[in-house]
Image (spheres, grey):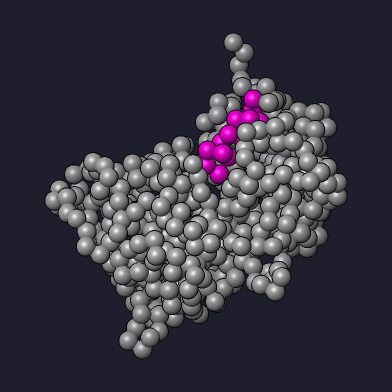
Amino acid sequence: MAKPKKVAIIDYQLSNLFSVMHACTYVGLDATITFDKKVVASADAAILPGVGAFGDAMKNLDNTGLTETIQEFIAQGKPFMGVCLGLQLLFEESEEFGRHKGLGVLKGDVKKFPTVQDGKAIKVPQIGWNKIYSSDTGIAWSHSPLRHIKENSFMYFVHSYHVVPEDESVVLTKTNYDGVEYASGVLYNNVFAVQFHPEKSGEDGIAIYKNWAQQNGLL
Amino acid sequence: MKTVRVIPRLDIKGPNLVKGIHLEGLRVLGKPEDFARQYYKDGADELVYMDVVASLYERNSLHDFISRTAKEIFIPLTVGGGIRTIQDIKEILRAGADKVSLNTAAIKNPSVVSEAANMFGSSTITVSIEAAKQSDGQYLAFTDNGREYTGIEVGTWSKEVERRGAGEIIVTSIDREGTGRGYDTALTELVAKQVSIPVVACGGAKSDQDVLAVIEQGGADAVAVASLFHYDFIKRRQSVADTSEGNVEFLKQNKAFSVMKPTTIRKVKQYLHRHDIQCRLTN
């Protein structure tokens, strides 16, 4: 029997990675937490998690050489999953604490939630559960790690910023937070990235990790 | 429409889950992992673990408990109780918690909130405010599990906490806590009006109506519930307590309840849903 493939969970000193690790272990992945660009480069798949500031994250990725490593990794077509800040970093630019360049893998930028929407104050960050639904440009969920997940399922979100992809066709899921509709998940070739935390979203979230692992032949 | 979170609060003393009234007089109710697992299955949105002894000796067993539950319970875990330093926070997060709750340490040295928020991210840092109503109607914050007077007014402190970068505030009414007299909706409203970060109401729920009231009248973004769920849990099943420590007389006597209408997470959420409050319903 073939051994499970190696998954690198990229540690750039800016997040609590243990829940991602627990989720990977639970579904049977052989995952390692690493900030070593050589380990990441040689892995069969990679996960970019993250909670924290965009600018600090990019600084750490640049300093460790992980920026180029990640860009090359994705260009090679190996399975890549982004979670929360990991989704945001894939884009070109963010307005968080000044303008910062991202990894530029996907076109578009990152904007903050407004504190007032439709005349009502909204709480920022969004902390809590919210629904995901498919985008009109419709990537079928059945061919993605969201296979068997029901429309309008609840996932757990913690964020103040959201991505604005230039190309609607990469949008896998949308979410509406107090009147603000935004892209909460993207799928583009080998890149799958979500704003919510599947490792904190109960059994549905764990199913997403399992689907990603299975669909990419990682188990 | 915002989605409200329902969060069971587990007070932990060594190997046991305990419950007090007004944050004291702790009764042993059983093994915390049994409660945690059941609440996860029942659709809890998050879990809060409060270490009510917070001594060095007990801290290790708490870390073990966090690690064990983090491996099989995939919802956010907030841990609080005696967290004093950045190093304490690091260790709790490393054990598997997603958020930490600071109370005493934050009031004694507010800059720890900014330091922690900068280092770990605002959304990782929750500040817990334990409040008691004074005779002049003011709400003042207390530390050390509701025992130490600070003289600090809750509204002012809430604003300060937000300014320093806390991601959310959990506000507990010491007066209502464990009594089943309902949440103090005025206290919750006071805090919710001062800040633009999420506010979690805690203390006093005796029924699903109380939960609805603190959301509708108090403006709570989330509710923390202890007695209401714990007493339902022990009513329904044999709760096995580690009788090596704590006041287990209550459990042994198998008493019934007068004020409280113990219920499940699922039932509370269905009730909220019927009253047009959006919350996450699971199968």
Q: Is residue A140 above or below residue B43?
A: above
Can you tell which quarter of the image residue A216 is in? Answer: top right
The furthest residue to the bottom: B136
Task: Please check the rendered image and state whether residue B138 is part of the magenta-colored stretch, yes or no.
Answer: no
Relative horizontal placement of residue B57, taking residue B198 as reference (left or right): left
- Front-lying residue, A123 or A43: A123
Relative horizontal placement of residue A125, taking residue A167 as reference (left or right): left
The image position of residue A206, as x and y in percent, is 56, 36
Q: Is residue B268 above or below residue A45?
A: below
Residue drawn at the location 31% of the way across and 73% of the way down = B175
- Front-lying residue, B63 or A131: A131
Can you tell which quarter of the image residue A213 is in? Answer: top right
Q: Main secondary structure of the magenta part?
A: helix
Relative horizontal placement of residue B197, taking residue B203 as reference (left or right): right
Q: Which residues are magenta?
A: A201-214
The furthest residue to the front: B274
- Identify the image quadrant of the N terminus of chain B: bottom right
Q: Is residue A134 above or below residue B187?
A: above
- Front-lying residue, A50 or B74: B74
Residue drawn at the location 51% of the way across and 54% of the way down = B99
Task: Please check the rendered image and state whether residue A210 is part of the magenta-colored stretch, yes or no.
Answer: yes
- Front-lying residue, A105 or A186: A186
The image position of residue B263, as x and y in percent, is 34, 54
Residue drawn at the location 15% of the way across and 48% of the way down = B252
The image position of residue B121, as x and y in percent, is 60, 57
Q: Is residue B235 above or below residue B224?
A: above
> Can the viewer see residue B106?
no
> Can the viewer see residue A218?
yes
Residue drawn at the location 48% of the way across and 78% of the way down = B190
Number of marks in the rendered image: 0
The image position of residue B219, as x and y in percent, is 51, 71
